[in-house]
Image (cartoon, rainbow, N blue to C red):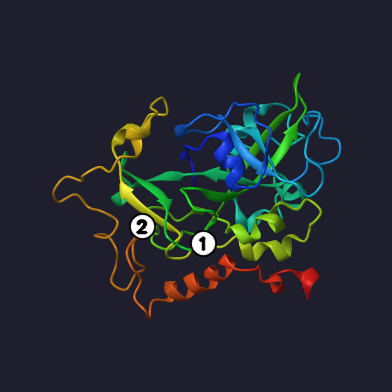
């Protein structure tokens, strides 16, 4: 899952990196401990017809827009916004089936820009566990230079209050290579070459989009331990992502790994490791998008 992340770029840098028009009104703030129900930037394509949240001068069809949204999806039919606190993540395997996500998957997909996220290593399931900061690795397909990662997301516009409310959820899939021992779910990281296809609201073939929702291969993500302060959502600041020295003898993800398992993120994969082949396949995303993934190109 993904329940806490960082977004430390300003609006200008985000808009430039994602080739988007800034529609945030200067409200993007550096955040080292983003928690559910807070308002954060997302990137969408043109706004759907009837989206009354769109101000004058909103981008036309085909453009990208950086806009603000609240983390925790509230479907248009919900009676109140409280349901959003339970909808911060959406499982990739059931997006096309669940009424909560089905329509958004078909027409309201977004990118969630992040500069890292946190997971806790809990041997034996014991809490609170040791937090790790997971950040961008050196895989060439990720996107523009810098710390930016783009998570796959869905968004909705809820009109049950005085003002329209834009909300979003982060899509999760199986564990990224090297993160298996932290959690059995990871956010979907989309390589830059598929951003346009993912955002296109006129592309509704969800079966063809499903292959994009795969775990990130080796090289996309790296990690290191951080201090326990990140466990309190009130804490902010760059000290939260400073490397934390584990006490002598403390178990880490590598120590718990069974023989023959995938390397922990940030460690090199052996040449004959199956994860290396997965990385090569994802590497194709660094170049032109292979349209054979999509039914309309066959």
- 238 and 245: which one is in front? 238
Furthest residue toward right: 50
Quarter occupied by the C terminus: bottom right
Give the percent coordinates (x, y) of residue 286.
Answer: 56, 66
Task: Characterize the local packing of mark 1: few (<14), some (14-19) or many (20 or more) Cα atoms within 10 angstroms.
Answer: many
Of tags 1 and 2, the one toward the viewer is 1
Task: Indicate left or right for 268 with 92 as reference.
Answer: left
Task: Characterize the local packing of mark 2: few (<14), some (14-19) or many (20 or more) Cα atoms within 10 angstroms.
Answer: many
- 268 and 180: which one is in front? 268
Task: Indicate left or right for 139 with 42 as reference.
Answer: left
Q: On screen, 167 above or below 92?
A: above
Circle 2 residue: 181
Circle 1 residue: 215
- 164 and 98: which one is in front? 164
Give the percent coordinates (x, y) of residue 263.
Answer: 34, 66
Q: On screen, 228 above or below 295?
A: above
Task: Indicate left or right for 183 with 25 as reference.
Answer: left
Label 1 or label 2, whichever comes before in sequence order: 2
What residue sits 54% from the left and 68% below the top? 282
Give the percent coordinates (x, y) of residue 158.
Answer: 74, 31
Residue 41 found in image quarter: top right
Q: CA distance from mark 1 to mark 2?
A: 14 Å
What residue sits 38% from the left and 61% below the top? 178
Task: Indicate left or right for 118 with 121 as reference.
Answer: right
Furthest residue toward bottom: 272
Give the percent coordinates (x, y) of residue 69.
Answer: 64, 33
Q: On screen, 260 above or below 54?
A: below
Residue 264 found in image quarter: bottom left
Under circle 2, the secondary element is loop
């Amino acid at each position: 899952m993904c329940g806490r992340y960082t977004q430390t770029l300003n609006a200008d840098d985000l808009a430039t990196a994602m080739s988007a028009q800034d529609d945030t009104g200067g409200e993007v703030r550096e955040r080292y401990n983003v928690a559910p129900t807070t308002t954060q930037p997302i990137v969408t394509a043109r706004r759907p017809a009837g989206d009354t949240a769109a101000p004058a001068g909103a981008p036309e069809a085909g453009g990208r827009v950086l806009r603000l949204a609240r983390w925790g999806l509230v479907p248009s039919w919900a009676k109140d916004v409280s349901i959003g606190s339970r909808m911060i993540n959406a499982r990739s395997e059931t997006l096309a089936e669940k009424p909560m996500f089905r329509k958004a998957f078909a027409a309201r997909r977004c990118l969630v820009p992040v500069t890292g996220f946190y997971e806790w290593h809990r041997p034996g399931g014991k809490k609170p566990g040791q937090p790790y900061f997971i950040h961008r690795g050196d895989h060439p397909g990720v996107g523009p230079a810098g710390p930016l990662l783009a998570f796959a997301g869905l968004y909705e516009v809820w009109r049950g209050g005085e003002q329209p409310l834009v909300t979003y959820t982060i899509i999760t899939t199986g564990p990224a290579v090297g993160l298996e021992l932290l959690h059995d779910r990871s956010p979907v990281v989309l390589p830059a070459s598929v951003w346009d296809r993912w955002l296109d609201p006129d592309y509704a073939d969800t079966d063809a989009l499903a292959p994009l929702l795969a775990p990130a291969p080796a090289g996309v993500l790296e990690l290191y331990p951080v201090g326990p302060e990140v466990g309190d959502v009130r804490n902010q600041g760059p000290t939260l992502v400073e490397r934390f020295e584990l006490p002598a003898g403390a178990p880490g993800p590598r120590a718990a790994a069974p023989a023959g398992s995938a390397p922990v993120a940030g460690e090199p994969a052996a040449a004959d490791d199956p994860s290396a082949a997965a990385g090569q396949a994802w590497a194709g995303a660094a170049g032109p998008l292979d349209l054979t993934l999509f039914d309309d190109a066959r």
